[in-house]
Image: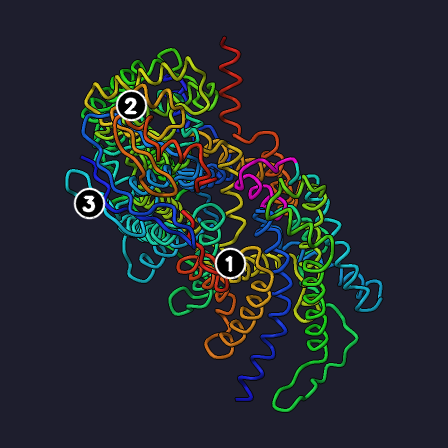
Amino acid sequence: MTRAGGWLLAAGALTLPLCLQSTYHLHVAIMAGIFGVLAMSLNLLLGYTGQLSLGHTAFFGIGAYTSALLTLKLEWSFWPACAAAVGLAGAAGFFIGRLALKLRGAYFVLVTISFAGVISLVSVNWIELTNGPLGLPGVPAPELGPWSLRTKTAYYYLVLAAVALSYAVCRRLVRSRIGRALMALRENEALAESIGVDVTHYLVLAAVVSAAMAGLGGSLYAHYTRFVSPEVFLFTYTVTMVIMVVAGGKGTLAGPLVGAVLFTVLPEALRAAASWQWQMLAYGVLLVALVFFLPRGIVPRLGATFAGRRR
Amino acid sequence: MAELLQHLLNGLVLGGTYALLGIGLTLIFGLMNVVNFAHGEFYTLGAYVSFAVLALAGIGFFVALVAAIVVGAALGWLCEVALLRPLRNESIDTTMLVMIGVWIAMQNAELLGWGGVAKSIPHPFPMAPLVLGPVAIAPLRLFVLVLAAGLIAASWLLIQKTKLGRAMRATFQDRDTAALMGVGIGRIHAATFAFGSGLAAAAGALLGPIFLVYPSMGDLASLKAFSVVILGGLGNLPGATLGGLLLGIAEELGAGYISSGYRDAVGFVIIILILLFRPSGLFARQERIA
Amino acid sequence: MLAVNDLAVRFGGVTALERVSFEVRPGSITSVIGPNGAGKTTAFNAITGYLRPTSGRITYDGAALTGLRPSAIARRGIVRTFQKTSVFPALSVEDNVLTGLHLRGAAGFLAVLAGRRRLAAEERALAAEAAEIIEFVGLPRRRRETASALPYGEQRLVELAVALAARPRVLLLDEPGAGMTGAEKVAVSALIRRVRDQGVTVLLVEHDMRMVMGISDIVIVLNGGRVIAEGVPAAIQADPEVIRAYLGGSAGSA
């Protein structure tokens, strides 16, 4: 993407609320942004480090619950609560990272699913803390000084800032020595070790950053929908995240964002035409088709097409 | 004491079906190296086939079970031939993603076809429990236990004694040699996947009448199956059998003595603990190769 | 100096290495040869931390290496290549070597997130080093190509470049000539000499006798997991034990 293209995109994103017709469209944009953060977080682990985590909803949920509980029960302001959510989710990531250190591939996937399963069961059963299946309503909207970020427009800019921040973090990480170490782990772990890449350190780093970013997504979600329940642990969210990353292009910076926009806008656009179950069914078929026909995802394929045309 | 025995008995009934799930998956995951996240969906399929036969067609239980196994095996065969065979040389992550896709597609197809409301499968057994000394067991559950044991025994026989079973074991121990000896590798892979899926469907048909049938019942079944496979060691048939029984008993004891809300956590915790401390499973002999 | 003392590796009922002791003279090219199954790669794996020895000590400049992870051993300056071609397949040649320069960089997590100028300077320095190394192994025209797309011989050169990028003081090469044409082997031999001339100690495992005898200062012969001879190439070629090991009915069929 060229410099000019980047500026154009930024300008577009900044002025989007002015161009959109209704608050519904703004809602879609906000959800796309939140999922963009989630997809980017999963991409860090799956796309760059090469470890599939199907338990990312655990970090998302921990972030959401932490943020909600701190603002509801301890009356914290949004900003420290969000920071705490990021921190706690990151700590959970550290735990999983160290736990799963000896595990790769399918076993890592299983541990992440199990972890998410346990956390989900806790959220349902620990009623004193989480209110169980009834959930936590009335999560307050963030406040910036005297202003309440209650309106969709205001929240859009909050989410946009989070997306930009997450993207910047990912970009800096990926295009550095750290990114190279992560990709080395993905490409050939034995070789990576032989040239001095400390596997423990970098796997845990990837897990922590990935989890923390998902926690950010969770906090944003909680304060937007103003309600948190064990439904945040639904497997459909995991599936959606995976599709976004895999379809968008894992191991690319733009891929998860493209995937997030596509798979937030598309379901909303098709909502009238087809129910949610049909869409999920389509997702399943799509995933299979992607593996066969577009294994690297949309962004690399577009990149290759344009590169071909330029010559 | 009687309470303990009761829990153990209930655990055995559950465990028998978990063993079926585990045996199927240990062949697919352990031998074929396919991370079959759709395994639970074949379980669900079996339950729905059983529902269709019993509730809609009004035919007997045995027919329902057989139908479930046949449908499960047939769909399994199809999956292997259409989706897994072309990807056989790809990495394990690729097949994993494909099976996740199948998982999502199957579950939502069931959701669309049957609706999300849980269904109850009618069964011909009397409701009054049989009292055997200190314990009681519903006739349905006893029937399920007996059938599960029968299927487990049949599976063991098939793998150990039949030509197909020998061919399977040979293929997965040393594919090239088996091919040289004239074993049709493609057929063996398809047969193995079909066999595993058929067993999963059987488990669903057996447990369906005891519990309710709903589209997402397969999610937990998949994970519990993985739990059993990890517990017993990959590709280890007796391990999977024992592991299934252990899981069933552990769940019942946990639900009875600790908390029923966290019942499903037992499987998760097993996965985490075993993978951390004894990744080759409880029953595998320790082998340290560089 | 790399010293191996009484190294033994046993697994299950198999003894792969037994009472193996040798020292690698700094600045030399030392080769380890022996029939298939003699334990050569096992020794490499033990030295570089991919395998935990059953007993024995491996030291470098007096400090123990046994028990360290491969990445820690690499930090001490001991780097190896692998028997099977080992590159980072989806990365370009340039990125492969840049990754190899991992230990040369210092940027940590916080520095990466925050830093601008110092980070950029470090990256530029690393890119320049990578270019040098790619030049050294003779692949400047392949800089941007994906490693997995290169022909076999060139992939092995990429492998060598990645290992060199880690700035080893001792370089362990596992069958550098395997699968190569005669001309390629000559080129690789020349490269190995040039690496030694830069002050790197080279320890290599190899089957091609002409190559071994041509570049080695010292040759160590393993058979059945034991050292049966050690000396200059001429002496080894004349050693009756060695001849018997290769031609006679000795243990050690793979």
Mark 2 closeness class: few <14, some 14–19, many ≥20 residues within 10 Å = few
Indicate left or right for C94 with A232 as reference: left
- Pointer 2: what residue? C234
Picture coordinates of residue C48 (x, y %)? 30, 39
Name the front one of labels 3 and 2: 2
Whether residue B99 is in magenta: the answer is yes
Q: Looking at this rendering, what residue extends furthest in the bottom direction?
A: B133
Look at the image and tell me in which quarter the N terminus of chain A lies. Answer: top left
Residue that carries the numbered disc 1 in the rendered image: B230
Query: From mark 3 to mark 2, how far is it between C-alphas?
Result: 33 Å
- Which residue is rendered at x = 61% and y = 55% of the image? B25
What residue would you read off at disc 3? C64
The secondary structure making up most of the magenta span is helix
Label 2 and label 1: CA atoms lie apart by 56 Å
| Label 2 element class | helix
Q: Amino acid at mark 3?
A: Ala
Please say if C206 is above or below B143: above
Residue B2 shows in this picture: yes
Look at the image and give the residue range highlighted in magenta. B86-103
The chain containing the residue under callout 3 comes to: C
Residue at the far top in the pictured view: A311
Within 10 Å of disc 3 (Cα), the crowding (few <14, some 14-19, many 20+) is some
Residue nearer the viewer, C135 or B15: C135
Sequence-earlier tag: 3 or 2:
3
